[in-house]
Image (cartoon, rainbow, N blue to C red):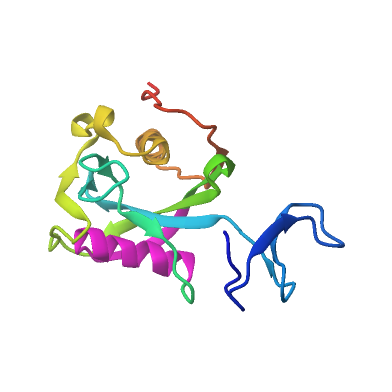
Amino acid sequence: MKFCSQCGHPVTQRIPEGDNRLRFVCTQCDVIHYQNPNIVAGCVPVWGDQVLLCRRAIEPRLGYWTLPAGFMENGETLAQAAARETDEEACARVSGLELYTLFDLPHISQVHVFFRAQLVDLDFAVGPESLEVQLFDERSIPWAELAFPTVGRTLECFFADRAHQHYPVRNEYLPPLLSRPRQS
């Protein structure tokens, strides 16, 4: 950040009085500009024994497969964000959203949240951020072509939990890794 969004003057980094972290502070109006993590919300859309994945049409990870997910917008709940992203990326409607995985990613200042959800019908299609949308059973998941470690981990948990029909809410820290092989 170089300029204040309130008055347009330059900002500097310093620790404001009563704080303990470096913040961008306007040199003119003294507004403190806090930077907080972004929340990514998505779904594990299920139809029978299959899950719906999207092949990304945008960077990052163009051409790789992902669960439908994206940045939460102001004015919506986590579940609303997950359902909206599923609609935007896969033109799919979901119901019965249940909180499933939460991943802390402080190295990129993000939190990823996935809900288990049922597809309402098979009326899904490619959205503007997807090249392809397809249902996969566990054996046909393109594990080596998954876009993000949080997607792979969520799918690993889902298929393991499905065997027992018990889906605990999971909160995990995923360290920075360039790649993460599938855990068997």
Task: Say left or right for 6 vs 126.
Answer: right
Coordinates of residue 108 in the picture (x, y in percent): 52, 44
Instruction: State the image quarter where residue 115 is shown.
Output: bottom left
Residue closer to the observer: 182 or 18: 18
Residue closer to the observer: 8 or 48: 8
Instruction: State the image quarter where residue 41 is shown.
Output: bottom left
Residue closer to the observer: 12 or 83: 12
The stretch in magenta equals 77-99
Task: Say left or right for 45 vs 3.
Answer: left
Quadrant location, the C terminus: top left
Coordinates of residue 160 in the picture (x, y in percent): 39, 33
Question: Magenta includes 8?
Answer: no
Which residue is pictured at 72% across the width and 68% down the height?
27
Q: Can residue 34 be seen from the camera position used here?
A: yes
Name of the residue lying farthest toward the right: 18
Which residue is pictured at 82% across the width and 58% down the height?
19
Coordinates of residue 58 in the picture (x, y in percent): 25, 50
Q: Is residue 2 above or below residue 6?
A: above
Question: Magenta includes 89?
Answer: yes
Residue closer to the observer: 8 or 128: 8
Task: Say left or right for 153 vs 109.
Answer: left
Task: Say left or right for 165 vs 118.
Answer: right
Which residue is pictured at 51% across the width and 57% down the height?
38
Q: Can residue 116 be seen from the camera position used here?
A: no
Coordinates of residue 161 in the picture (x, y in percent): 41, 38
Quadrant location, the N terminus: bottom right
Which residue is pictured at 86% across the width and 62% down the height?
17
